[in-house]
Amino acid sequence: MSVSRYHCQLRQGAAERRAETHPLTWRLREDGAVLGLDEYVEKDGYAAVREVLTHQSPDDVVATMKEANVRGRGGAGFSAGMKWSLTMKGPGIPRGYLVCNADEMEPGTFKDRLLLEQQPHLLIEGMILGAYANHSYYGYIFLRGEYVEAARAITRALEEAREAGWLGHDIAGSGFDFDIALHTGAGRYICGEETALINSLEGQRANPRAKPPFPGQSGAWGKPTVVNNVETLCNAPSVMRHGAKWYQALSGELSDDGGTKLYGISGKVERPGLWELPIGIPGRELLERAGGLRDGRALKTWLPGGGSTGFLLPEHLDKPLDFDTIGELGSRLGTGLLTVVNEDQSVLALVRNLEQFFARESCGWCTPCRDGLPWVVKLLQALERGEGRRGDLEMLDKLADDLGPGKTFCAHAPGAAMPLASALRYFRDEFERGVAPPARAAQADPMPVGGA
Amino acid sequence: MNETARRIASDADGFVLEAEDRRAMAHERDHYEQPQAACIEALKIVQRRHGWVPDAAIPAIAEVLGVGPADVEGVATFYSLIFRQPVGRHVILVCDSSSCFLNDYEALRDALSAWLGIGYGQTTADGRFTLLPVCCLGACDRGPALMIDDHTYGPVAPDDVAELLEGYA
């Protein structure tokens, strides 16, 4: 058949990947098959767990993670060590949960899939370290329902790890108990928001919760709960095995953020894909590795890390792809997987597509998000048809502001506002061209207000 | 009465939770601190057997888990992969997110619609296929992508549609 089944594959071959420079991917098999327990252990797997659980205290782990500056790879970039230091733990406090956020649904993002499908033991090892540091007694891998192959790989890996004594009672003779269950979702992007994820894990509608209390204080079933992204947790074993200084040196001069990152690129490029590279490489390197744009087209704009990040321009391609730098440019690094738009493609149409996504995926809990996003979609659709009215652009400006940080219950609407606000800023002419001449506009229906 | 209508009628009348499914739900319940947490998995268990979740399954699940039917209903109506009306033997989930959009997903969607003779949210009259959009499938390096049942494909060109779908009886 001419259509092939999708299989996630790293663009880097085995020759390029080494233990010293590619902590996330050096063990991956050339054939892309899942790494079983034996092969993982042969390649230094579970060595960090053995070492840490018998020779270090939980606070040592937190301190090392902090020093390494592992920033959350789910998109927010919050220091994992800092998060772990804020978890309530100690005498009189019940041991809680460590939850791996494997609900990868950010538009343009396909990185966690690789780790889940091909190296589940690295994640399990990272979760054991995280659980030890946070005094968690039980872990969940919250996996999106559509990742069927990942579910199979994780289920098998959990069985292997349990049989070998890496999960369960008295792990590696350390006296530490911890086990993990796989929890698969049933759709809805909002489940990736950490408090919505906790509600979903509890078998409720995935509406976000108010913070405070933060999950580290009171999360799943009222117990201290740590939620970390797949890639974040997969960094823990190498950090604990080789130390914070080694990890920091991976990115060296490129960035203050430590380590490597699974970077990727998609859109109309010659060779879209995924690479493990030092954090802080410029976007241009990814574009070059991808062989540039298809059909000799020029780059118009790009999203640095998913649908909830702001557009950047070709002139930003030489900036380091790290959390602070991309933040200073008015966008967010997000997941670090670039989406590129070529000169022939409409930013207005793409923003409409993104806002339709966010409107559909709003949980409906708070008004700006529930009613504001469908309104944005209606305005964008009218502009796309050339039937926009005078004042529509200003209304979109206002909506982008009203959906921004601090005005809604969670980060969903601010995420939706980011591509909208940046597109209005950089590509305003595209929006202006959608405003109908006065004669036609006068005949247009009154603007619909409110929800879809 | 077409195939879909027949299945609605037969499944909604006299819904009985199979003993095996009941046991599977009870087993899931043990993975969590509180039984409500097994709610989504219980809905999926019903869906695996019947293809969808009829209204009459809601109180049955509530009873097994010892939670209120309204709680189960609230969950059942929230999640996009829990189907509340009969679906075809094969469910096609078409990724409509940004990377696929930039790789001409709309042409694929239109080709699917034309071949099947249905739009999003609909099932073919012979009960073979249901067509639905889905959040970014995480296959952006091979877009446009889609899923049929448990398998993800990409890139899928409009011309591939006939050959691909003919493989699903």
Image (cartoon, coloured by chain):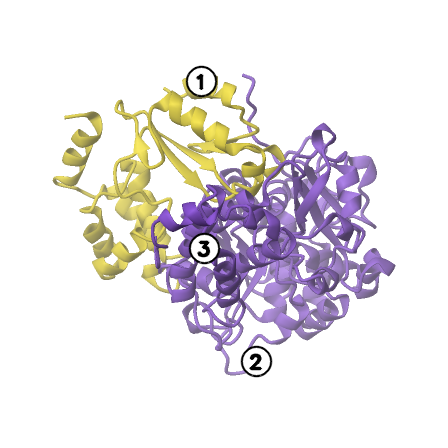
Residue B62: image location, x then y, percent: 23, 56
Frontmost residue, A190 versus B68: A190
Q: Which residue is mark 2?
A: A90
* Direction front: furthest residue: A439
Q: Which residue is mark 3?
A: A376
Disc 3 element: helix
Chain of the residue under label 1: B
Task: Give the chain coloured purple.
Answer: A
Disc 1 and disc 2 in contact, CB within 8 angstroms: no
Residue at horizontal 46 percent and vertical 56 percent from the top: A190
Q: Amino acid at mark 1?
A: Ala
Task: Give the chain coloured yellow.
Answer: B
Q: Is residue A16 above or below residue A367?
A: above
Frontmost residue, B116 versus B154: B116
Q: Amino acid at mark 3?
A: Val
* Residue B139, numbered circle: none
Q: CA–CA distance between discs 1 and 3?
A: 36 Å
Residue A327: image location, x then y, percent: 69, 63
| Mark 2 or 3, nearer chain start | 2
